[in-house]
Amino acid sequence: MKKILQACILAGSLVLVAQSCAADQDTRTRVDLPAMMKTHMLHSMRDHLLALHEIQAALAKGEFDKASDIAENRIGMSSLESHNAAHMAPFMPEGMQSIGTAMHHAASRFAMAASEGDLPRSLDALSKVTEQCVACHMSYRVN
């Protein structure tokens, strides 16, 4: 029993050390936001992810107009007001703002491409949207 307890303590300690090392090696720029704004931003990002899922599902069914509408209204330039983008932007580093703006523009360009019903062109345009998501998440972390 004593050996099992020691093994559990050792395992728990190793997990804590591993988590600590991982946090120390996170080189992304930390973005400190007031709690309410952080919650709002994370909610918006989760909605963007859900929208991307819905877009892919619509494309798979050949529902190009639906994919276009989702993109424009949920993550495109038309969505900025619903996400309070103007209110959030001053709390973000300039680079993060630029990536976010590029993502919203890319989503609107995708919406136009999808409305034409060309799958390869639509997928290429969609990859420009997710390219911005990846760039932001690789560069910044919200605290």
Image (tube, rainbow, N blue to C red):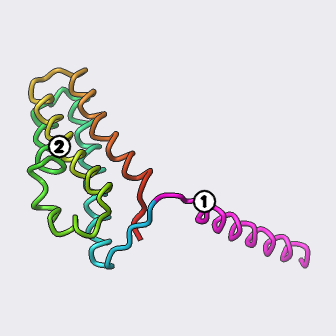
Q: For the residues marked 1 and 2, what is the alpha-carbon distance in whole angstroms?
A: 32 Å
Q: Callout 1: few (<14), some (14-19), or many (20+) C-alpha neighbours within 10 Å?
A: few
* Residue closer to the observer: 67 or 81: 81
Residue type at numbered disc 1 = Gln
Q: Is residue 12 magenta?
A: yes
Q: Is residue 136 above or below residue 123?
A: below
Q: What secondary structure predominates along the stretch shown in magenta?
A: helix
Locate residue 56 relative to residue 138 in the image: left or right.
left
Locate residue 1 relative to residue 86 in the image: left or right.
right
Q: Secondary structure at mark 2?
A: helix
The residue sitting at 64% across, 66% down in the picture is 19
Q: Considering the image in quadrants, where does the N terminus appear?
A: bottom right
* Residue closer to the observer: 104 or 39: 104
Q: Is residue 29 above or below residue 122?
A: below
Residue under label 1: 25
Give me the disc on residue 105. 2
- Mark 1 vs 2: CB contact within 8 A: no
Q: Is residue 47 magenta?
A: no
Q: Position of residue 113 (x, y in %)?
A: 14, 28
Q: Position of residue 74 (x, y in %)?
A: 16, 51
Among the 4 quarters of the image, the one containing residue 117:
top left
Q: Is residue 66 above or below residue 50?
A: above
Residue type at numbered disc 2 = His
Q: Position of residue 94 (x, y in %)?
A: 29, 59
In the image, the segment drawn in magenta is 1-28
The residue sitting at 84% across, 77% down in the picture is 5
Give me the disc on residue 122. none
Among the two numbered marks 1 and 2 on one chain, the one whose residue lies closer to the N terminus: 1
The residue sitting at 53% across, 58% down in the picture is 27
Q: Secondary structure at mark 1?
A: loop
Q: Is residue 108 above or below residue 17?
A: above
